[in-house]
Image: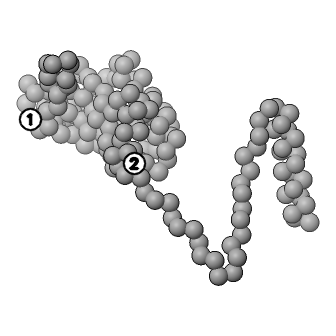
């Protein structure tokens, strides 16, 4: 009787879906035979592959800030919105937001402003629907200066937040 109700519900869903031009996504359940083992757990994807996928999907893993600011501008918002979409599509991924200060900042100020920047990015991602438990925040201050290559010239990266897959 129960199987008949399931088939009836599946047929109703199928007719509704085909009327709308879509096919329903029904789960496929395959029972195990006696003595058959469970399928192996899915392989973990290397962090470098996930990082590359994030960069490809969002255009960058880095957002930049003004020298004394921690507010998110329109360019950063576009990148972070794309990162949030990627994170929502990959719910098993956790990230670490690394805030950086400027080279001319004092050590204490660079650590504090780096943390404020990373927290602003975290708040933006949480507002986009990413669970806060998946996001860790840290500040490198000015301890890890970055660089950007523009043609043949290398320029200091400065104030930024980098999204790293954990």
Residue at x-position 74% and y-position 50%: 26
Q: Residue at x 77, y 40 (%)?
A: 23
Is residue 15 found left or right of 53 in the rendered image? Answer: right
Q: Percent from the top left, x then y, of residue 122?
A: 37, 36
Question: Where in the figure is residue 109, as x and y percent of width and height?
Answer: 13, 32
Q: Is residue 15 visible?
A: yes
Outermost residue to the bottom: 35
Q: Which residue is at the far front?
A: 152
Question: Is 43 situated left or right of 3 in this image?
Answer: left
Camera sees residue 135: no
| Alpha carbons under labels 2 and 1: distance apart | 28 Å
Q: Nearer the viewer, residue 154 or 125?
A: 154
Q: How is the image coloured?
A: one colour
- Local packing at callout 2 (Cα closer than 10 Å; few below 14, some 14-19, many 20+) is some
- Residue ID for mark 2: 94
Image: 8 above or below 132: below
Q: State which mark lies toward you, 2 or 1.
A: 2
Residue highlighted by disc 1: 107
User: Could you tell which of marks 2 and 1 lies nearer the N-terminus?
Assistant: 2
Q: Is residue 47 left or right of residue 146?
A: right
Counting every numbered tag in the picture gives: 2
When the figure is inspected, residue 138 is found, relative to residue 150, above or below; the finding is below
Mark 1 secondary-structure assignment = helix
Where residue 155 sits, quadrant-wise, is top left
The quadrant of the picture occupied by the N terminus is bottom right
Nearer the observer, 77 or 147: 147
- Which of the 4 quarters of the picture holds residue 139? top left
* In the foreground, 57 or 123: 57
Q: Secondary structure at mark 2?
A: loop
Q: Position of residue 27 (x, y in %)?
A: 71, 54
């Amino acid at each position: 009787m129960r199987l008949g109700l399931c088939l009836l519900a599946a047929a109703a869903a199928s007719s509704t879906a085909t009327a709308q031009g879509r096919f329903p996504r029904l789960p496929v359940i395959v029972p195990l035979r006696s003595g058959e083992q469970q399928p192996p757990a899915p392989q973990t994807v290397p962090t470098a592959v996930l990082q590359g996928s994030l960069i490809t999907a969002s255009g960058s893993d880095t957002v930049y800030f003004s020298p004394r600011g921690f507010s998110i501008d329109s360019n950063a918002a576009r990148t972070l919105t794309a990162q949030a979409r990627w994170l929502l599509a990959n719910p098993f991924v956790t990230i670490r937001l690394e805030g950086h200060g400027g080279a001319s900042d004092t050590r204490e100020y660079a650590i504090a402003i780096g943390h404020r920047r990373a927290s602003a990015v975290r708040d933006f991602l949480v507002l986009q629907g990413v669970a806060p438990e998946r996001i860790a925040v840290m500040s490198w201050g000015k301890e890890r200066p970055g660089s950007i290559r523009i043609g043949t010239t290398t320029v200091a990266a400065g104030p930024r937040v980098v999204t790293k897959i954990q």
